[in-house]
Image (tube, helix red, strand yellow):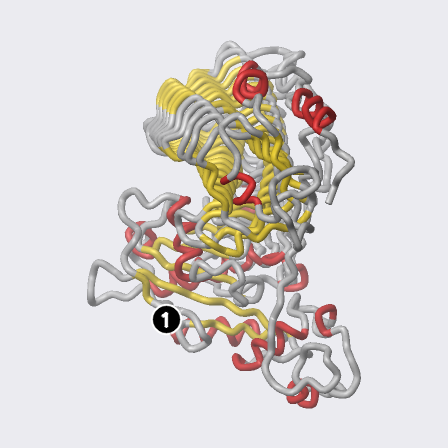
Amino acid sequence: MNRAITLGILVIFVGIFIVSPTGSISAQERHLVNETHLGIIIYVDYNNTVGPWDGTIDYPYQRLQDGIDHASSGDTVYVSCGTYHENIVIDKSIMLIGERSSSTIIDGSYDEFVVNVIEDWVVIMNFTIRNSGGCIDNVGVKFNSNNNLIKNCIIYRTKTGIYLDNSSFNEIDNCTFHTNGGGVLLKTSDNNVIKGCSLSRNAIAIHFEHSTSNTISFSYLYANGIACFFEYSSNIEMWHCNISDNSVNIGGVFIIGCSDVSLTNCVICHNGAGVSISSSRGISITGCDLYLNTHFAVSLRTTSCDIIVSECEIRDNFRFGIYLEKGNSCIVRNNNICDNVLYGIYSEIADCSAWHNWWGSHFGPSYTKLRLGDKITWIPGQIKFFPWLAKPLDGIGADWKNNEPYMQGEIDDVTEKRINLSGDDSDGDGIPDWWEEKWGYNPSVWDDHVNFDPDQDALNNFEECYTDQYGSNPFHKDIFLEFDWMESPNPNISNRSPIDLIESVITLFDEHNITLHVDLGDLGGGEETPMICTSNFSFAKLRDVYWDYFLHNDLTNLRKGIFHYGIICNYCPDLNFPFFGWDQFDSFAISAQWLKEKNPLMTRGQLIVGGAVHHLGHTLGLLADTHGGIDNLDTPNPFSLQWWKYRNYKSCMNYRYKYKLLTFSDGSNGKGDYDDWENLELGFFKNSHFEQSEIPSSSVPRYN
């Protein structure tokens, strides 16, 4: 136990710990320390195994909960380094301080919660908090109280990292969230602050639902499925944040049914959609850098109004700068909009006032790619772009260009996946003798099977042994895919993938020396689920389907990292798309009924399987920035430049052939083609990465 820390030193330490990312001390933090917590210090050290236990520095409690139970409001509970397998309840106004965040660990052992705070004015500092359960309301830290502070904590392997439920005036400061179903969730919670945080490898990093007057600042959101998901909330302020390298199919900031949201001085780089707005009003994007986003820098989907984009750099996006669907209204003014591959602004009968922008040319925007300026749609009156600027604007976009302290590197998940295999194991290497004999290994010689992957299919020998029951071969590439499908509203129609089409896809994979194992109920998974996809079926609820029906709410489920996952819905949040169910890009969803309504001349089965192979390709690393013909909305338009450029790309990854060809291209079809098969990254679904390595010719710098 640590006897070197005296009471006097700790009091001084407590007084100085609360410096914000900008170097200032917030009024709320100062009040918490100076006026609320003036009591005694109680010590906890798990090394005190023999007692006595009275909470003194010489005889600390061994258990965290004992220290809390014997504290009074105003006291400080100081916890020495160690791993505490507990589920603690904080029911008094105390400070709970760990010795060091990386090695003072509270492990919830996959229970309902790790820390539950039910009293106001609580401070939690310097802990790693991990391993909650996987059910819908399971959490790392839950606040059902107000005026709390959590600082300098690492939170990972939880269903939700921090959950604020009807909880106000709390601060989350300088915390790291990774490998969670959700990083931070606010429900009906107001006037809370998130600052100086790093969030990565979460299905949804920050989620606000029915909440108001909350702020996010100086935070780094990267490698998430969705960085921010704001729904039915208002008065959100987000500034000086880096939102980069999230999922290149969804990824950025999603605003649904919200009002009065401002994004200011942010870097929004290399996401699927930088900012996506639906059914919202009063949204402003000001002084931001939006570039290298693969589908849209800004998209307005279902009807929204009072949207303002101003003083932003919108350039070098792989498809669209700004994308406006029918019925939307926006003002786009005093921006540099240039070098976006398809369109600077695309409008589908929307009202867009786009005066005083620089379009990359003295001659303004272009209706075709035959001129230098960024292309816009040609329908007169839809985009009001005159007068335009004759030279680029200086001093706009984000005013910071370098790494900052809160942009720390990702902390690896140190939890090792264990597969316990039955059978005699003579050499003690973890693999039973029968499997080693079957595949030519010597059962009397220890082998490092956890690092053996002779066929380079991203399944090591432990995983190959586990899937031996499903026909895997350690010397031949295997891909495993589980399908679940939702009950159809029509009892005569099923959303289950047709066996004949699945078998034809399996044959095509086999021709390229890959065995595709598809689980429709005979490989340990695959089932019909209830009809969950109602009118309010959101990305968050889709994520919960993944946890309920793929993981079965078990964070140690062995199928994770072995099987890809597909869910066939009636109506998903979009037509079809890949998504993060947890921490990796391993899943996709298909809206079977919606697709059928959009494509009445095609069979339901062809649409389901065509979408499935396309999105399986995404989980194997075929992304929109891999090749210009992938996910290019212009390729289906006859005789367009993109149609002509990628006409030879005969792949289901090409929107022109998505539901017609149930295979990838081999690159042999001429100019504009791409060898999908050669460029498959079989391990992408378990080690997803979205860093954009190529720097475009523009002057906008990269922020890594």
Q: Residues within 10 Å of mark 1 (few under 14, many from 20)?
A: some
Tell me the quadrant of the picture where the N terminus can be found. Answer: top right
Q: Position of residue 470 (x, y in %)?
A: 52, 79
Q: Position of residue 347 (x, y in %)?
A: 42, 28
Give left or right: position of 434 versus 35. right
Task: Name the residue at 76% across, 73% down.
Answer: 448
Q: Is residue 251 placed above or below 569 in the rendered structure?
A: above
Residue found farthest to the front: 52
Q: Is residue 350 visible?
A: no
Q: Position of residue 261 (x, y in %)?
A: 43, 22
Task: Name the residue at 47% across, 37% down.
Answer: 90
Q: Is residue 161 placed above or below 339 in the rendered structure?
A: below
Tell me the quadrant of the picture where the C terminus can be found. Answer: top right
Give left or right: position of 214 versus 344. left
Q: Is residue 138 placed above or below 123 in the rendered structure?
A: below
User: In the image shown, does 193 or 362 lie closer to the viewer?
Assistant: 193
Report which quarter residue 441 is drawn in: bottom right
Task: Name the residue at 57% across, 51% down.
Answer: 107
Amino acid tagged 1:
Pro
Task: Name the residue at 37% across, 43% down.
Answer: 538
User: In the image shown, does 44 or 663 lie closer to the viewer?
Assistant: 44
Circle 1 sits in a helix, a strand or a loop, which is it?
loop
Q: Position of residue 673 (x, y in %)?
A: 62, 55
The residue labelled by disc 1 is 498
